[in-house]
Each structure stands twice: as structure tokens, then as C-alpha cells.
Amino acid sequence: MNHTANTPNILEVNHLSKRLGTFALDDVSFALPQGFIMGFIGENGAGKTTTIKLMLNMLAKDKGEIKIFGQEHLQYEREIKERIGVVMDSPYYVDAWTMLDIEHAVSSFYSKWDHSRYMNLLEHFSLEPKKQLKALSRGMKMKLMVAVALTHDPDLLILDEPTSGLDAVARNELMEILRIFMTDERKGVLFSTHITSDLEKVADYITLIHKGRILETQTKDELLEKYLVVKGGLNLLTTEQRQMLIGYREHSVGFDGLIDCASLRHLPTSIVTEPSNFDEIMIRFNMGGEIDE
Amino acid sequence: MNSMFAFVILDLLSLKQYRKVFFFMPLLAVLMSWYMKADSIAAILCLLCSMIACTYLFSIQEKNLLDTLYCTLSLKRSNIVIARYLSVFCIEMIAYIVGLLLITILHAFSIGIDSFRGDFIALNVGLFAISFFVSFQIPFFFRLGYQKAALIAYIPFFLPMLLISATLTLPFDIFEFVRGITNGFILYGLPVIAGIGCLGLSCMISCRLYRQKNL
């Protein structure tokens, strides 16, 4: 699944399935070309973290294929992990460790670990090297994880809700770091988040997951152009037309909903249309009434 | 291989917060040996301390979500398991060496009533016992996690160990009995080799269990 003809995919997920109790990740496929940032969005419990855990071999897949740097992720697990930086949504270091202990603990796993870069990043994030992890706020812990993920100069960053717990200034700093990281066109970022305003600043591609299924995976602009918010009076639409809307909602003076532009011609011309945004798309799909693909 | 040694360092670093306790243990062991007039108590306490340290590795792993950290590092699941057994072996060896030093020092000052040879055998058989218990525990920890496995894997074996160590002459009597019916020299090396064998077998089981675990 190549999105750009000449650019190789840095990450490729094909027909990935996994059942976990009542939740199922169903036939998930998407690809991230080299040199781009992909936003991975969906409501809580949509399957974002499960997909990332499958990539990291934290969960065993039931079906499907994951290729990172063009290599099968289990067969070349060690080589692949040497080249990726990961930030998950919860800190995963020993509470009693200082920033220096963390460096001692993980640096030996990476041939490209750069001590001075680590120190620079700690300074940039205002983290004291001798401070223990348990003395840090959640936001500071997330910054530390970002610093660790970037220090070995990874080719692919996998970020699972990295901005949760960060204030607006810190989020902006992170976006700036990602922008600098992406100046090297051989790199890529998979950025899972539900704070979609961050993605509007940096993402090139968006993959929308809902209830374990991929609904959309395309460029940010294509996705925003594809869906429109429609509004109008209560008696304007027939039942069939209402069924075309995603997240159809009625209120005292009218209705609103999301529509695929391709279906817009089936609606009356008097209907009001507005551009959509990622939040709107995510919320409407979560409300239901999606079109089966 | 390098990444497995790096993992051992990571493991030992995770015990950093308990280092004062572990440094204090030999002192406590000497005091108990002096009070009970049995040098083997020092060795057995050191080995028990190593057993606790080994289980702490799993407790810390679970409490701090280190499974996630391990999955971000350039390691295969089987490497993680093998490296954890290497850590356990290192901890046991440290306890063994400290125990050996302690009984040597205690004998030099003639605190105990037992022979050095008997204490040395007690240390070796103690190492085997600890290896055996830890080998039993670790697959449970890998499969179920520390909290869930603690009741199955920890308490039923920890209590008998305490009872045995509290019954002062029992280990000595057992070793003397076994020494009487076998060549005494076999007892020096055999328990250590048998202990390593137990850890190896346990490692194979753990590799299989941890590979299948959803983290």
C-alpha cells in the first residue's frame, strides 16, 4: 500500500487482526512513507495502543503482517528496535532511577546512543540529571521519555499519546522537536493521539481507527477535504438522506452531521456546509451512522 | 550477547533502591551466627537474601511497567528471559561469595562450633536449594506477574526455608548424613551443578511462557 510512488514505506501494516477479550482489531492496514509524520487518531479504546503494542511485539498478532524498514517485525526484531524510538502513554522506568541511571540502564542497547545529545535534551526540557523519576510530574516524565527516545537517533518514532499530561507550551516544544527530527527525510513518525490540534500542526498523513477498524488512511488535506459538516432545518432531509450522514444529530432548530463529499450531491442544495476538522470527524464517527466501506 | 549483559546491568540497577538493605544483610548474618553459635546461619541468610533480591526483580518489573521498557529495547523476548536468569545467577553468585567469605572470617575468629567443611557443604547445598526454589518461582512470575504469582510461588517455599534455617542443627545433620553415605567431595560441586541445571530447565519453560504472554 504505497501512498507515494517513489518513497519507500518506513512502516507497513497489512491485514492485522488481534482479538483481546471482547475487543477485536480487525483487518487493520495502513502504510507510512519515509519522510512523513502520520497521525493515528481514534477515540479511547479504538485500538491505537493495541496496534502499537503489536508493532512492538508486546502482543502476539492473530493474523496479518507488520513491516518496519521493509523488514518483517518479528524476524528482524532486534535490528528494527535498535532503529526505533518509542514513547508510550505511561512512564516505564524505575521510580527510584535518576535521569543518569536511566542512561546507564538503556544506553548499552543502542550503538548510536549519544550522551551529549541526551544531556542537551534534558537541558532543553529543564530536567535535572540527578533528579529521581518519582520526583517528576507526569508532564516531566513524558518529556524524559521523549528525550530517551530521541537520543539514539532513531529512524522511526512511535509515539503513543506523547502529549497527554503536557501543557500547551511543552506540547508546542514537542511539535518543534518533531519538526526538527523530520528535517531528515529518511525518518518517519507514527503519532497516536486524541489531541488532534497537535496533528494539525505537524501531521502529513492521518489514519483514523474506530472500534478496531481503519476507517480512513490518507493525507491530512485529503481527509479534511473529504468530509464536510452539514447543517439545516429539521424537515430538509428524507430518512434516506439522514442515513447518509455520519453522527447525525437533531436539536430544537435543526440537524447537523458529517458527510462524505462524494454523497453531497444527494442532499438538497439549500443545506449549509462547513469544513470539518479531525475532532469533528472523530466525534461523528464515534456517534455512529458511518457508511460501510 | 552484549544486549543480554546490558540487560543484566539494567536488572541490577533496578535493585539500586534496596542496596542499603543488601549491604546490611551480611552484618545481620554475622550477628545471628555469633548469637546462635552456628556459622552456617550466615551463609544461609546470605542465600535467602539473594532469593529475595531475585523476586524483587519481578516485583519492580511489575510495579514500574518494565515489561513495556523491555519491549522497546533491541531484545527478543527469549533474550529477556535468558538475561533475567543470568541476573539471577549473578545475584546467587554474589550471595555465594559473600557467604563463603563470611564463614571463612567466622571460622578464623572461631565463633561457631561447626567444622569449616560442614559449613562449606551447607553453603553449597543451600545454593542448590535456593536455585531450586527460584527455578520453581520464576516461570510463575513470567507467566502470571509478581502479584498474581506471589502466593503460589513465594510463600509456600519461603516458610519452609525459614523453618529449616531456624532449626539450627538440622542442615548440619542432613549434610553430615549425606556426607556419610557418599563421597564428601561430591557434595562440594554437585549441588552447584544441580542448581545451574534447575535454572537452565526453568529458563526453557520461562522462555516458552513469556513468548506467549500479552503485555
Image: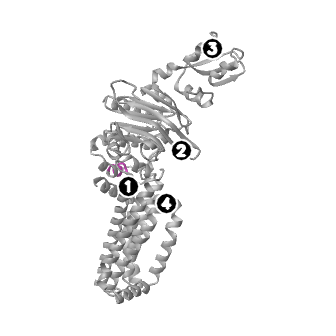
Type of secondary structure dominating the magenta stretch: helix
Name the amino acid, label 2. Arg
Residue A6 placed where, x, y %? 33, 24
- From the image, tell me which residue sits under label 3: A267
Q: Judge by depth and name the residue closer to the eye, B17 or A160.
A: A160
Quadrant placement of the N terminus of chain B: bottom left
Q: Is residue B152 left or right of residue B198?
A: right
Which is in the foreground here, disc 4 or disc 3? Answer: 3
Residue A100 falls within the magenta-colored stretch: yes
Q: CA distance from mark 3 to mark 1?
A: 58 Å
Residue at position x 41%, y 85% in the image: B174
Question: Which type of secondary structure does the marked residue at label 1 adopt?
Answer: helix
Residue B88 falls within the magenta-colored stretch: no
* Same subunit: marks 2 and 1: no
Q: Measured along the vertical axis of the image, is residue A162 above or below residue B98?
A: above
User: Magenta stretch?
Assistant: A98-103
> How has the structure been colored for display?
one colour
Q: Judge by depth and name the residue closer to the eye, A256 or B113.
A: A256
Badge number at residue B78: 1
Question: Which type of secondary structure does the marked residue at label 2 adopt?
Answer: strand
Residue B56 placed where, x, y %? 44, 62
Q: CA distance from mark 2 to mark 3?
A: 39 Å
Which is in the foreground here, disc 2 or disc 4? Answer: 2
- From the image, tell me which residue sits under label 2: A19
- From the image, tell me which residue sits under label 4: B146
Q: Badge 4: few (under 14), some or many (20 or more) residues near its Cα, within 10 Å?
A: many
Q: Badge 3: few (under 14), some or many (20 or more) residues near its Cα, within 10 Å?
A: some
